[in-house]
Image (cartoon, rainbow, N blue to C red):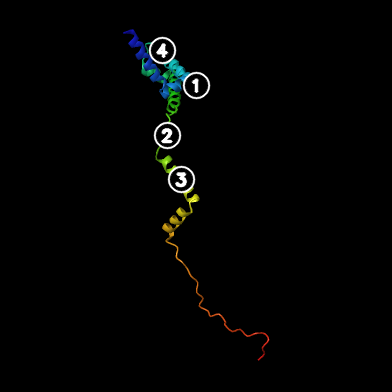
C-alpha cells in the first residue's frame, strides 16, 4: 500500500516538474522573491485589518495598510507577468510551412538541374516555341555592275 502511494507521489512530482509554470518558478529567483514579498505584504495587511477597528475606515485612513495592499498588488502583478511569459512548449516538427518550403526548394533545384523540365515549364507558361524560318522579302541583286565597265 505504501509503495503505491510513493509511486503515485513520484509520478505527480514528475508531472509537476514538466509543467512550464512550475519550471519557471523553480528557475526564476525574481519570481520567487516577488511571491514572497507579496505574501508578506498581504499578511501584514491582514494583521492591520484584524485589529478590531472598522475595515472600511481603516482602508481609507490607514496609510500603512494602503502601502501593504499596494505592495501585495504589485508583487502579484509581477508574479503573474513572469508566469504568463513562461517558456512555451516546443511544437513538434513538420507542419504545412515546412512542407511547402521543402517543395519550393526541391522544385527550384529540379528546374536548375534539368533542361528538359525547364523547357516543359517554359512551354506551359508561355506556350510552345514556334519554329521560325526567315525569308527575305527583298530581292538580292543578281547582276551588280562591275567597277571596270563604264557607261
Compared with residue 113, is residue 29 higher up or lower down, i.e. above or below? above
**Distance of mark 2 from mark 4, alpha carbons?**
53 Å
1 or 4: mark nearer the eye: 1
Q: Position of residue 128 (x, y in %)?
A: 43, 61
Q: Residue at x 42, y 17 (%)?
A: 42
Quadrant of the snapshot with the N terminus: top left
- Give the mark, 1 or 2, whose residue is nearer the N terminus: 1
Secondary structure under tag 3 reads: helix
Query: What residue is shown with label 2?
Result: 93
Query: What residue is shown with label 3?
Result: 106
2 or 4: mark nearer the eye: 2
Would you call the spot at circle 4 few (<14 residues within 10 Å), some (14-19), or many (20 or more)? few
Quadrant of the snapshot with the C terminus: bottom right
Query: What residue is shown with label 1?
Result: 30
- Give the mark, 1 or 4, whose residue is nearer the N terminus: 1
**Distance of mark 1 from mark 4, alpha carbons?**
26 Å
3 or 4: mark nearer the eye: 3
The residue lying toward the viewer, choosing from 76 and 4, is 4
**Distance of mark 1 from mark 2, alpha carbons?**
33 Å
- Give the mark, 2 or 4, whose residue is nearer the N terminus: 4
Would you call the spot at circle 2 few (<14 residues within 10 Å), some (14-19), or many (20 or more)? few
Amino acid at each position: 500500500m505504501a509503495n503505491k502511494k510513493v509511486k503515485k507521489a513520484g509520478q505527480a512530482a514528475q508531472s509537476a516538474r514538466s509543467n512550464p509554470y512550475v519550471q519557471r518558478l523553480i528557475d526564476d529567483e525574481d519570481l520567487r522573491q516577488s511571491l514572497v514579498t507579496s505574501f508578506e505584504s498581504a499578511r501584514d495587511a491582514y494583521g492591520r485589518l484584524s485589529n478590531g477597528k472598522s475595515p472600511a475606515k481603516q482602508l481609507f485612513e490607514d496609510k500603512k495598510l494602503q502601502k501593504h495592499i499596494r505592495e501585495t498588488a504589485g508583487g502579484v502583478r509581477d508574479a503573474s507577468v513572469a508566469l504568463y511569459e513562461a517558456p512555451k512548449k516546443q511544437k513538434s516538427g513538420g507542419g504545412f510551412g515546412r512542407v511547402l518550403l521543402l517543395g519550393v526548394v526541391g522544385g527550384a533545384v529540379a528546374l536548375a538541374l534539368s533542361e528538359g523540365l525547364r523547357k516543359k515549364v517554359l512551354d506551359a507558361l508561355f506556350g510552345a516555341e514556334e519554329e521560325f524560318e526567315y525569308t527575305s522579302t527583298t530581292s538580292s541583286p543578281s547582276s551588280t555592275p562591275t567597277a571596270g565597265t563604264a557607261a
